[in-house]
Image: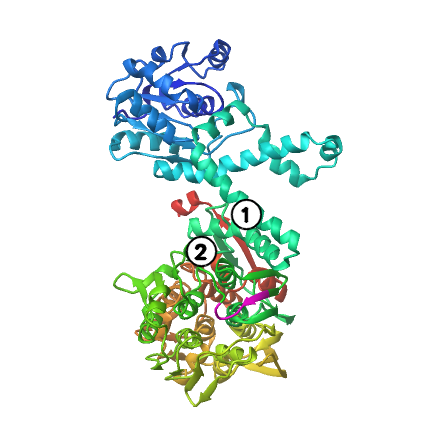
Amino acid sequence: MSRWPLRQVAFVGFGLIGSSLARCLREKQLVERITASSRSAATLRTAKQLGLIDIGYSDAADAVRGADLVILAMPVNATEQVLRSIRPAVTAQTVITDVGSTKGNVVAAAERVWGRVPAGFVPGHPIAGSEQSGVLAGRSSLFANHKVILTPLPDTDPRALALVESLWRHADADVLTMDVARHDAVLARTSHLPHLLAFSLVDTLARESQNLDIFRYAAGGFRDFTRIAASDPLMWHDIFLANREAVLQALGTFEAGTQTLRRAIEQGDSETLLGIFTRARAAREHFTHMLAGTAYAKSMTSSNELIFTVQPGGRLSGRARVPGDKSISHRSIMLGSLANGVTEVSGFLEGEDALATLQAFRDMGVVIEGPDRGRVRVHGVGLRGLKAPPGALYVGNSGTTMRLLSGILSAQPFDTVMTGDASLNKRPMERIAKPLRLMGAEIQTTGERGTPPVSVLGSVTASRGGLKGIHYDLPIASAQVKSGVLLAGLWAEGSTSVTEPAPTRDHTERMLRGFGYDVQVDGATVTIQGGGELTATSIDVPADISSAAFFMVAASIAEDADLTLEHVGINPTRIGVINILRAMGGDLTVMNEREIGGEPVADIRIRSARLKGIRIPEDQVPLAIDEFPALFIAAACAQGTTVLTGAEELRVKESDRIQVMADGLHTLGIAATPTPDGIIIEGGQLGQGEVISHGDHRIAMSFSIAGLRAAGPIVIRDCANVATSFPDFIGLASRCGLRIQASERSASQQTDA
């Protein structure tokens, strides 16, 4: 197959798409000679005057004769006629592709002409366009950052496919492949149906008696939606007829949806309307993240890397409130969805992990209003009201969501698949799958390491009589596994109990009681009885102590710091960071203690202190498991040696937090020796340099606060996932006195680096 530049490229049809692609070929010097045919002699004259073609022909066969590559860019209803015309002029070595919006009719036309689709024919469809048409509307950048779908057949020549893929990549397009029938079904819904509705709406309103006023007072939404009704009528006439069956199916599905809306409005069905509107509002961003495999708060429009740069110095003072507790935010959505009635949540953390939980329950039919400045209303469906989601549940980067949902989904009468982003899909899920299988659940993880996707065959479990209560001794302390088992126990026959080897956060037990469910705690064992009900309540989410930990350490190591953190949750299973900092000599005062919604809350004042290295008590490890990256920074600034043991759990978080923190500390001149279950850190002077967070939000924030005691600037790479738990970290840190800025590094700069 020919390599670039090609000797000759031929276009049949030379409107917007053809002329844009020709411009790209010319500008990038990808072809020696361009020929074209068109029904319009004026089009060919204009193209020649613009230098887009070398010669034009009225006969398509003349245009394609001798071409390495033929691009069919004419209306889809002319495909068979054109193929018959050019058949004598092409050879077995000629690569042919097209740009039509439908693919089934193109393939069928080729089969009728040749008897079978030639191996060199690669059907294609650039999803790019404009309301303008014709040769003068073309532009070389038309396809940049747009998708081009290729629909190769089983007999397509791989070399032909490679050439066409290369063509579109030279045009800066994102090239995808898809089955022919699937392409036509998807495009009928995402492109053809919206155009059909726009044409219909404008035509319907234009025929009303008050049409002048309708268009005079039309708002921006009307103009935005009906913009596509200005597209080429003849082209769309051909598309709708060519893709008739798929368009009719899409239209039927849409009509069923409008009938549901009509009935809801007629009957004053507020909940149905809210459900449709809230799901629709969130759907676009949700599916975009699913397709890209990224986190909810990460920008989808940029492939740039987010960089934090921290200048040395800074002085922390004043009062601040960090975002709501992530663990409690997760559980408020879960239990609120399973309760009877409407649960009101305030202080909800609008970070990507909690949003993943919220979206998962929306996908299972729960109406959820918000979040709006931390306020959420959850219209619970009861323990038996969840519905099968339309597809896989995508939970982004949230291990909490996946592990707790595993328990809930195990008891449902439908099957579910859960998946996540690249980071989550490397994390172990067998630790929750094993006890659930003991309860009778049919649950499968992936590969030898038991990672996501996780498949839960709820229908199989239900057919076997459902879940049975068990007693489970946790092999390692894990609040997520404990919670997943207890949540499954809500549906299990008999009692379900879990015994912990060490205390872990007890938010699930506290919140179950808040929803009116009886929970028994006897020492290290938690027990519930299946078959009860949850009753809606109000939840005020306290500030997250895990987020507060960064500022506790920051104020402890900064010069002349005096910072008060407000409304921090001080659940006794979470206060390891306070205990450890105090043991290191930290100056922390817990004030204004109170209880809100079953959770203890307080204000915490932190002042500068001369920290000393310690051997961290192992009984504090489960109480501070998420806070250790920040505590490692405290250890680096302390006098003497800090030793951590019993923390092997840190190696299977969003990153191997022991190794990643050790690597970063080495870069900054601190002696840090990883061990299988911990680390040994020699306090010293932090230097300067560039560290990599490996997409771990807690690593990124920990090295950010290290800048307070660094000898020079610290650059932290791969920080986009900070939005996992702390959407406004940069803003709040800056307001408190940290000298930090965020910037982006382009893909080319990353490569150069």
Q: In 3D space, how far apart are the residues under numbered discs 1 and 2 (Cα atoms)? A: 42 Å
- In this view, the residue in front, 496 or 3, is 496
The answer to whether residue 145 of the structure is visible from this angle is no
Position of 709 with respect to 201 (left or right) is left
- Residue 465 position within the rendered picture, expressed as x and y whole percent measured from the top left: 35, 72
> How many discs mark residues in the rendered view?
2
Q: Amino acid at mark 1?
A: Gly
Q: Pointer 1: what residue?
A: 257
Element at badge 1?
A: helix
Q: Position of residue 141 (x, y in %)?
A: 48, 30
Q: Which residues are magenta?
A: 378-384
Kindly report which numbered mark, 1 or 2, lies closer to the viewer in this rendering: 1
Q: Residue at x 40, y 24 (%)?
A: 25
- Outermost residue to the bottom: 523
Mark 1 vs 2, N-terminal side: 1
Q: Is residue 244 magenta?
A: no
Task: Quickly name the residue at label 2.
Answer: 718
* Image color mode: rainbow
Position of the N terminus, as image quadrant, is: top left
Neighbourhood count class around disc 2 (C-alpha, 10 Å): few under 14, some 14–19, many 20 upward = many
